[in-house]
Every structure is written in C-alpha cells, then in structure tokens.
Amino acid sequence: MSRYLRFLVPLAIFAVIAAFLFKGLDMNPREIPSPLIGKQVPEFSLPLLEQPGTLITNKDLLGKVYLLNVWATWCVSCRAEHETLVQLGRMNKVDIYGLNWKDERVAAQAWLKQLGNPYAANIFDKKGRTAIDLGVYGAPETFLVDAKGIIHYKHAGPVNPDLIRDKILPMVAELRKKG
Amino acid sequence: MMFVRSFLLSLFFLVIATPLHAATLAEYTFEDPQKAADFREVIDEMRCLVCQNESLAGSNAELAVDLRNEIFDMMTAGQNKDDIIRFMVARYGDFVLYDPPMKPSTYPLWFGPLVLLIIGALVLIRALRKKSVTQETELSNDEQQRLDTLLKQPSDSKDAKK
C-alpha cells in the first residue's frame, strides 16, 4: 500500500502542477476580466471626432446593439485590426462606434480618410477620462453593448475575422432577439 | 571594450533612473500631510494596468500618469482612500489591487499555502512516527535466536570453503 503511495503521490502532485502550467500556456495576462460586463456604459458627453462642435452622449447610443471600439492613431495594433473593422462595417450587420482615445484630431481624421471609415461615429476622448470610466487599459479594446446600453462583452486587443464570426456576430444576433 | 562601454552606460542609466522616478511624484502636493500619506499609500497598492508588475506610483506609463492625476484630483476634492479603491475596482476589477480582497474566488489564494503547509506537516509527522516505530521494534524470538547464532559463529567462518 505505502509502496504504491510513494509512487502515486508524487505522480498526482506532478499531474496537478502540469495541469495548471498547461492551462497557463494559453492564458493571456493582458486579458483582464472587466467588472463592467453586465453594467451600463458610463455616462459621457464628448465632441464627435468628425464635428468638433457636436456633442455625443451615452444616451444618443441607446436603442440599438452596437460595438464600441477604442482606438488611436498612436496604437500599432489598431492599425493591424482596422482592415477587419472595415470589412465588418461593409457587412452592415452591426453599428460600430469608435472611441478615439487620447489622440490628435487631425491625425485621426486623416487615418480614417486613408484607411477607410467603418464607424457610424467617433467619440473624441482627448483626455481619456471616459476611457478610464470604461476601464480601458490599452488600445484597441472592443465592447459589445445592447439596446439598453448594457455592456455584454469586452475584447482586449485587436479583433480578428474569426472572433467576429464565431463570437461577436452570434452575440449580436442573440442580443437583438432578446432586446 | 564594447562590453565595458555598455556596462558603464547601463550603470549610468541605472543611476539617473532613480531620481527620475522620484521626480514624477513631486508634483503632487497636499496641504494635509495625512492626505499626502494616504495618496502615496493608495497608489503604491494599485497595479499599473499597462506594465503589470509596476505599481501606479512607480509606473511612467501614460495611463498610470492619468490615473495618478485622477486619484490626486479626487483626493483633493475630499474623497478618501476607500472611495479611490472603490472607484478603481469598479473600472478595472480586483486586478488593480496588489492586496487581493478575501472572497470565495480568492480563497485558494489566501488559504492554499496554509493547506499545503498542513499537508506537509502531516506527511512529515507520519514519516517521523514511522521511523521512530521501526527503531523501537524488538526482535521476535526467532529473529533473536538467529542473531545469537550468527554472533556466536567464529569470525573466520565467512571465509569457509565455497
């Protein structure tokens, strides 16, 4: 009996450690669970990127399911994901709003002209205060919001076509059905 | 030569890096020294979300600077440490806290080491007990007889013809 234990106990310990380490291999330390899932989009009132004189608030976005994409021209990964967003915009399946984060207005406008504009509108968050309320810690980040303004999903890092097809669009469809 | 130069260069940056870090906090002044101490404490306890192994106090990431400013403004406006912690956790989750709160999802974190310690102690006690038991074991009659005969044998009997 104890002879088996002598062999089995270390094996069990090894198996547990190996299981944790193996799980750790595909966990992303950048992916921090957001406490905002299930909560309202925070209140904001900010100018549009396109029209400095026009304010947009969180209430203007109520009534439809939409994606809120945090981006900036200084963000390299945003450039990498932009083409995916442009393609998503062409599909006409969900509105994308942009939160232009701590950016230069002229540079951001030029970026959209040059790379294509998939956004229904862009919120110009020069000081990054609304981004703080959204718990943004790096660009790009993408939130999925329902018609009542509740956040259902957040993706940190660039979105890719697989994620859009397998995760985001199915969730959009489901939220539309419910709401 | 190349090595010496790069070594000296890194030494130089190491030396100038420390006062630079200190300088980033000098801009935050409070009239109330207690507030100043609270401010230092709270930003020391918060993790910078960009460079995850740095505290908000120690990080020069832009987001850390923004958050320090925000916390400074909140404290100047009269909010206390708990308000700040609630503000930060509501946005970034428990992840921002270097000192995780005790709740069911963090029980393994808090009690895991204790459980491991207890298991280790039990194993150790068992092993020690077993050892002392074997030492005290007395020989059965048969074994004692065999031992006696073995001891009585003349020492050269080992070399008896094979």
Image (cartoon, rainbow, N blue to C red):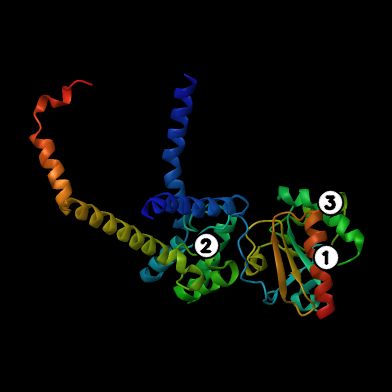
- Residue behind mark 1: A169
- Protein chain holding label 1: A
* Amino acid type for the residue under numbered disc 3: Glu
Chain label for disc 2: B
Helix, strand or loop at disc 1? helix
Residue A112 visible within the image:
yes
Q: Is residue B103 left or right of residue A77?
A: left
Closer to the eye: label 1 or 3: 1
Q: Where does the image place residue B29, in percent across and percent down from the top left?
A: 44, 64
Rendered image quadrant of residue B35: bottom left
- Viewer-proximal residue among B1 and A151: A151
Q: Residues within 10 Å of mark 3 (few under 14, many from 20)?
A: some
Q: Chain of mark 3?
A: A
Asked if badges 1 and 3 are on one and the same chain, I answer yes
Q: Which mark is residue B146?
A: none
Q: Position of residue B112 (x, y in %)?
A: 42, 63
Helix, strand or loop at label 3? It is helix
Residue at x 63% of width, y 67% of height: A34
Q: Are marks 1 and 2 on the same chain?
A: no
Q: Nearer the viewer, residue B76 or A133?
A: A133
Q: Are marks 2 and 3 on the same chain?
A: no
Which numbered marker is on residue B68?
2
- Look at the image and tell me in which quarter the C terminus of chain A lies: bottom right
